[in-house]
Amino acid sequence: MKLNINQWSEDDRPREKLLKQGPSHLSTAELLAILIQSGSPEETAVELMRRVLDDCHNDLNVLAKKEARELQQYNGIGPAKSVVIMAALELGKRRKEQAFNDRQQIHSSADIYQLFHPILCDAPTEEFWVLLLNQATKVIDKVRISQGGINQTVADIRLILREAILRQATQIAVVHNHPSGNRRPSQEDKQLTQNIMQGAKSLNIRLIDHVIVTENGYFSFNDEGLL
């Protein structure tokens, strides 16, 4: 006979286990089970979320890419539960971004990647951003310039420089993502970087880097000697 969670030993119930031992002692499936609260007649919330995670190769980054309609294909997950899962994963991304924002100063390409990875890692299409910095490389703001297709987006250099002038930035970095996961720049990426650098230089604004973000790494034009 199958037991539901309420019939489990109290130490094995996710909510009670969290209260007694702390969240770090729970598996990812157990934490997600707390969010959705119930499973289906065939399986408990923990079993359901364990199955969802198995389909995602136990990778929360893969789970975060799923849309509501994909989550709702699982028996036991309806609109309300899918929204809860998506909201929780988005909060995790924002926490990661906030942790970096507290530092506010850019020292390397790795800092740029850490700032933009939570924003771009799950983006299904290419996005182009400009990071605005003062003379001390402290962050003034970050602005999305354009959003395009799966393989390419178009960045207007005039818009990039306009944002820098409006916010009185003396240094900028540009960032875009490759949803394909390929970190290497295309010939168009290289030409665009040169055009941005020349345009910025004419306004006495320094382009410190162009970083291509993927889910599992990045490419830095500055690190590779391409600036």
Image (spheres, helix red, strand yellow):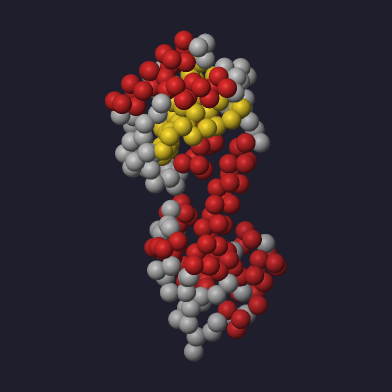
Dividing the picture into quadrants, the one containing residue 219 is top left
Question: Which residue extends farthest left?
Answer: 187
Question: Residue drawn 58% across and 66% down?
Answer: 35
In the rendered view, does 4 fall on the left or right side of 223? right
Direction from residue 20 to residue 176 in the image, left or right? left
Front-most of residues 1 and 203: 203
Q: Which residue is drawn at 33% across and 32% down?
A: 184
Give the side of residue 219 with respect to residue 29, left or right: left
Q: Which of 165 and 58 is in front in this view?
A: 165
Give the quarter of the figure containing the C terminus. Answer: top left
Does residue 107 appear anywhere in the picture? Answer: no
Across and down, in percent, residue 68 comes to: 45, 61
Q: Residue at x 42, y 13 (%)?
A: 198
Compared with 219, 55 (above or below) is below
Q: Position of residue 40 (x, y in %)?
A: 48, 78
Counting from the top left corner in percent of width and height, residue 123 is at 43, 45
Q: Above or below — where is 129 with respect to 169?
A: below
- Residue 44 x, y percent position in the rendering: 51, 77
Of residues 146 and 63, the one drawn nearer to the viewer in this rendering:
146
Inspect this view and state whether residue 35 appears.
yes
Q: How many labels does the image show?
A: 0
Q: Residue lying farthest right?
A: 20
Residue at (60%, 28%) from the top-left corner? 139
Seen in the picture, residue 132 relative to 121 is either above or below; the reply is above
Viewer-side residue, 200 vs 136: 200
